[in-house]
Image: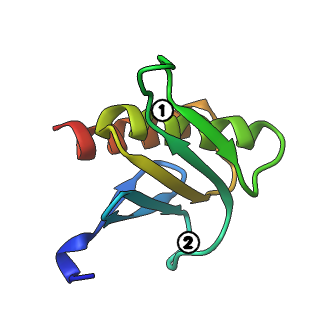
Amino acid sequence: MSTSDTEDFELSLPKMTLKFRIVTLENGFLVMISDSPSFRLGQSAVSVPSGQAKREPTSMAISAVGPDAMTVRTIAERISAWTGSMCMLIMAVKDTDRVVVMEIVNALKNHFVT
């Protein structure tokens, strides 16, 4: 993997600064999101893009529980839909609320779509 396969960026929010690392793989993306100075394991999900037999991306939570399981699955599914590729998302962010999740989705959409 070359250094061009990995992209880092930050998003400053009123309550926190989020770090993003996006690793482009041969068959998809690894996306890590952290609210600390370094990346760490957290809520995780994998998503496969939609195909001929299904209209929506398919996802599975790996190490996610509670309401955050649906959040990481949904974000991974969005990335798969935008890119047409598989996505593994690892999100280590405490105190997520609707506003924070929407900011994360918007930042990722701006990265992948524009």
**Of 37 and 21, the residue lying toward us:** 21
Which quadrant of the figure contains the C terminus? top left
Q: Quadrant of residue 24?
A: bottom left
Looking at the rendered structure, which numbered label has been put on residue 102? 1
State left or right for residue 55 relative to residue 36: left
**As drawn, 114 above or below 89:** above
Indicate the position of residue 58 as horizontal and vertical percent values: 57, 33
What kind of element bears circle 2?
loop
State left or right for residue 35 relative to residue 5: right
State left or right for residue 96 relative to residue 103: right
State left or right for residue 107 relative to residue 47: left
At label 2, counting other C-alpha atoms closer than 10 Å, the crowd grade (few under 14, some 14-19, many 20 or more) is some
In the rendered structure, which amino acid carries the disc numbered 2? Ser
What kind of element bears circle 1?
helix
Residue at x-position 52% and y-position 57%: 16
Q: How is the image coloured?
A: rainbow
In the rendered structure, which amino acid carries the disc numbered 1? Met
At label 1, counting other C-alpha atoms closer than 10 Å, the crowd grade (few under 14, some 14-19, many 20 or more) is few
Indicate the position of residue 20 as horizontal and vertical percent values: 40, 62
**As drawn, 27 above or below 72:** below
Q: Residue at the front extreme?
A: 53
Residue at x-position 62% and y-position 57%: 93
Q: Quadrant of residue 1?
A: bottom left
Residue at x-position 45% and y-position 43%: 104
**Of 38 and 6, the residue lying toward us:** 6
Looking at the rendered structure, which numbered label has been put on residue 36? 2
**Of 31 and 46, the residue lying toward us:** 46
Indicate the position of residue 99 as horizontal and vertical percent values: 54, 33
Residue at x-position 25% and y-position 47%: 111
